[in-house]
């Protein structure tokens, strides 16, 4: 096999249950040491949003939430807990679609997604195993990725990329796929505009959502909802192009045919 | 590293330029032999739509196309070749969105995509290097995948999966990502409904678009428009679940909030 023609995805097992204040880079470093995985230049570390959010203390106890009149109205229409809807609305710019058991919003960071990414599954803690806990997305996932990159690089002594991943549903197609909420050290969006095709015509495809493809690849090993493997290392990617955060993946509303 | 915790993506270089009537499985078999890659049980072979379509002779010479009045009207509005628009409309159930240089349709197979997947880049042939050639999607990509699976398995003596891949743009997010047009031998859509989370609550995420994640992962090595590496082998995926074609990824319009 020719050199540079293979990419390896390495699932990193053995992370403990993450709690608020935990140092995720330290947990990853310890798991790498146990598994005899040595992070190397060019590795991209995909990290599930859920453990980043937990470490950042983004948990909300719904018992402390008083839903607004608007949240109660929407909750009644879609059939959700009004306190959860209140939390979702507080994380959102606007509601995009409502349907029974469905609430699609534009998250304050621009993501169009179900429930503003607020999750009630696998959010129990050692002393609070309640259904009343909800987990929000990180406050700034690109910043989370940058911080994790800095901390992981300091431990590994290697130049790394980091992608904070989640799973989104999509219009028109069934099933969720891995997507990038945050990215550092990689071109999250790779610009191929201007590159001619084999016959000199400008390419139809101009930009590649590289961080989303990385997240989707990592998701193959993570499992969509399994908290057991929240970290996957991608080794051997040849990522040319200038560094861009995951924020670059959010389409300017003025250019979006579907808003 | 624990056994079964790694997936390898192997790019298969060295495929010749594919022409109508070529045996893609034979070309892949020959390239595997040259590269010393032996296909093994459980390998999933991701194959770019473009070479499948070319082998199936899905090329249209636009010089032979007479655009309808409707095609001419749309072409004038969006600024495309009216003959190309005619070909796109013939492949489509309906137009979803029009804008300058943008024509998003529902393909007759249900895919919502730009230009019905009709491609003018890299479609030159040995004797016709013209900008007047267009390439359609395979007639039935799931059937193409099944046939390629049968032919590849006969050559390799191994149980394989096959995914026919393309790159789609998406609402709300910039950049294209790999998606599955056809699939065989894998659960293109993995049903996790009913699996409880770590605390016994039903999972929020219920179905995973596994074939799309495979296509996105393969796309990391293929490059979006580079015809040089149209085949990527995914080794080590542990794919539980019953076989489903890529057709299962297309959402029932009655259940789609965005139609």
Image: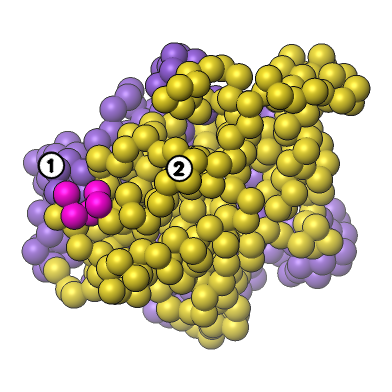
Chain colours: A yellow, B purple
Let me know if marks 1 and 2 both belong to one chain.
Answer: no
Q: Residue at x 30, y 74 (%)?
A: A158
**Residue B3 has which mark?**
1
Q: At which x and y percent is residue A85?
A: 75, 26
- Whether residue B245 is visible here, answered yes or no, is no
Labels 1, 2: front one: 2
Identify residue for label 2.
Answer: A51
Residue A72, picture quadrant? top right
Q: How many numbered circles does the render carry?
A: 2
Vertical placement of residue A6 versus A126, above or below: below
Q: Secondary structure at mark 2?
A: helix
Q: Is residue A130 magenta?
A: no
Q: At which x and y percent is residue B138?
A: 47, 49
Vertical placement of residue B252 versus A18, above or below: above
Q: Is residue A31 magenta?
A: yes
Q: Which residues are magenta?
A: A30-34
């Amino acid at each position: 096999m020719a050199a540079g023609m293979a990419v390896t995805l390495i699932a990193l097992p053995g992370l403990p249950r993450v709690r608020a204040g935990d140092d995720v880079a330290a947990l990853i470093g310890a798991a790498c040491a146990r598994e005899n995985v040595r992070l190397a230049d060019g590795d991209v570390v995909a990290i599930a949003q859920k453990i980043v959010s937990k470490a950042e203390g983004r948990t909300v106890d719904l018992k402390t939430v008083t839903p607004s009149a608007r949240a109660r109205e929407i909750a009644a229409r879609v059939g959700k807990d009004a306190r959860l809807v209140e939390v979702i609305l507080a994380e959102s710019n606007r509601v995009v679609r409502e349907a029974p058991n469905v609430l699609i919003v534009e998250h304050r960071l621009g993501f169009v997604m179900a429930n503003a990414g607020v999750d009630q599954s696998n959010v129990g803690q050692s002393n609070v195993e309640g259904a009343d806990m909800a987990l929000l997305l990180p406050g700034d996932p690109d910043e989370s990725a940058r911080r994790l990159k800095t901390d992981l690089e300091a431990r590994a002594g290697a130049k790394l990329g980091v992608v904070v991943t989640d799973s989104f549903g999509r219009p028109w197609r069934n099933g969720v796929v891995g997507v990038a909420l945050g990215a550092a050290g990689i071109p999250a969006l790779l610009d191929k505009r201007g590159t001619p095709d084999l016959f000199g015509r400008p390419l139809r495809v101009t930009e590649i959502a590289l961080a989303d493809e990385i997240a989707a690849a990592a998701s193959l090993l993570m499992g969509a909802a399994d908290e057991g493997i929240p970290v996957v290392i991608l080794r051997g990617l040849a990522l040319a192009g200038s560094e861009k955060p995951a924020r670059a993946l959010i389409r300017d509303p003025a250019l979006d045919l579907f808003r």
